[in-house]
Image (tube, rainbow, N blue to C red):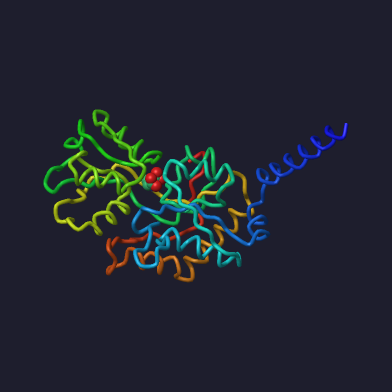
Amino acid sequence: MKKLLILVGVLVIVASWFGTLWAADTLEMVKKKGVLVAGVKDSTPGFGFVDEKTREIVGYDVDFVKAIAKKLGVKLELKPVTSASRMPQLTEGNIDIIAATMTATPERAKQIDFSLTYFFTGQKFIVKKGTVKSLADLDGKKIGTAKGSTSEQNAAKALPKATILSFDDYPQAFLALQQGKVFAVTTDESILANLLGRAPNKEQFEIPEIQISDEPYGLGMRKGDKNFADFVNKTLLEMEKSGEAKRIFDRWFGPTSAAPLSRGKFKITEGQRVTEGK
Ligand code: GLU
């Protein structure tokens, strides 16, 4: 009898623990534990990568979650994720938010919620100089990219005869290009420009003007976690208004950076959000 009571007690505790996790109001939970756990890339130059001097993970994505943690008045813990692991890490409760070069798509929005768009880019290719003039030059070839990315899916659609080789991350795919194991690497232009900009033999490669998709980045949060999503979106809009969002862009992609990019007319605005339906 006593054993049974203990068992029931343990089950009740475990069930309530799961209950709080799943029905969690992340905003409350993060405030209570005093730390925001963010899933970030650690080998995507410009966005989430290890600084050679400090050995810390730094980048555009990191600066956004830093600002959110600061606004919440809590510490920030960074957990490395890959393109393939980021959604399971979030839904399993190991991280509170994804800030990992993640495109908000209606398909992904069936499983998680996205913030307002905080970065905008499009998918392109890096190739050996002079080898590619049009999309047709890439079809039937071996193309490297990362597992679990939209890049993988878009490339398979745009190049039906190509062989898509998916690596854990983009530096590995770029290494395969340098070793002649793939003909091209494909992903977001923002990532390609950063890989190329930091490569010692960059003059051998180029990013032709061939774009196969639009890639609006969103911060990923658990589905239906409304208070947290509202807080994050409010913070993003404030960061745009105060100029902080632009300062972060310029820090990583400004004219003196390793990979100068144009922010163009991009601004974080109320209407730019990808949901299940669109
Ligand atoms: N933005 C694309 C994606 O979300 C490609 C970059 C990445 O793999 O993180 O899949």
Is any atom of residue 272 visible in this view? no
Q: Residue furthest right?
A: 1
Compared with 37, 245 (above or below) is below
Q: Residue furthest top?
A: 161
> As displayed, is residue 227 above or below residue 256?
above
Question: In the image, residue 70 lies at what x, y percent?
Answer: 55, 67
Q: Quadrant of the N terminus?
A: top right
Residue 88 in the image: state x and y as whole percent: 52, 41
The tally of labels here is 0
| Horizontal arrangement in the rendering, residue 152 relative to residue 99 (left or right) | left
Relative to residue 244, is residue 274 depicted above or below? above
Is residue 40 in view from this perspective?
Answer: yes
**Which corner quadrant of the image does residue 139 belong to?**
top left
Identified at 36% across, 42% down, the residue is 168
Residue 131 pos. (x, y %): 13, 43
Q: What residue sits 29% from the left and 66% below the top?
A: 257
